[in-house]
Amino acid sequence: MLISLDLSGDVPIYQQLRDRIVEGIAAGTLTGGESLPSTRQLAADFGINFHTVNKAYDLLRQQGFVRLNRKSGAVVDPAAADDAFAAGWSVRARTLLAEAVAKGLPADEVLATCRALLADFGEQDERQGDEAS
């Protein structure tokens, strides 16, 4: 998986790493059981502090997207959504939608964007299902 980061952007680097990895899981480019690069390797690749990568990996662990092991490192392990995740996701989605409304984006444009993004992830799921058959 190729990860692109904006090292001079407003979003913290650890958050960008976390987001790109979650997107990779959703898109199917990162699958359950797949090992992620070591914190030191990923830090060296981007020229960033390994503690930044460690923070991203720990956040992914806390959120149930990876498991961390001393021997195997970070391994993709997306757990099924539970009630707590669903409630938290809804709150975050509400805030993001509120931002779009507050900035004057038309509802039909917001919905079209949401559908297009979900379709991208859905297409990945369909392709993986076809490959497994």
Image (cartoon, rainbow, N blue to C red):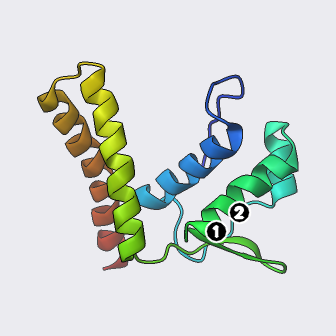
User: Which mark is drawn over residue 61?
Assistant: 1
User: In the image, what residue type sits under mark 2?
Assistant: Asp
Marks 1 and 2, how far apart at CA: 5 Å
> In the rendered view, does 75 fall on the left or right side of 87?
right
Q: Quadrant of the C terminus?
A: bottom left
- Residue 34 picture location, percent across and down: 62, 71
Query: Is 19 drawn above or below residue 77 in the view shown?
Result: above
Query: Decide: marks 1, 2 in contact (CB < 8 A)?
Result: yes
Work out whether residue 123 can be spotted.
yes
SS category of the residue bearing label 2: helix
Residues packed near mark 2 inside 10 Å, few (<14), some (14 to 19) or many (20 plus): some
Which residue is at the far top?
Answer: 104
**Closest to the observer, 8 or 106:** 106
x, y (%) of residue 13? 69, 38
Could you say which is closer to the camera, residue 96 or residue 78?
A: 96
Question: Regarding mark 1 in the picture, which secondary structure is present there?
Answer: helix
Vertical relation: 104 (above or below) 96: above
Residue type at mark 1?
A: Arg
Residue 84 screen position, x and y as percent? 41, 71
- Residue at 67% of width from left, 36% of height from top? 12
Question: Which residue lies under the disc numbered 2?
Answer: 58
Residue closer to the observer: 18 or 29: 18
Residue at the spot x=61%, y=62% of the render? Answer: 60
Residue 66, picture quadrant: bottom right
- Please report the residue visible at 55 percent of the width from the left and 48 percent of the height from the top: 19
Quadrant in the picture for residue 15: top right
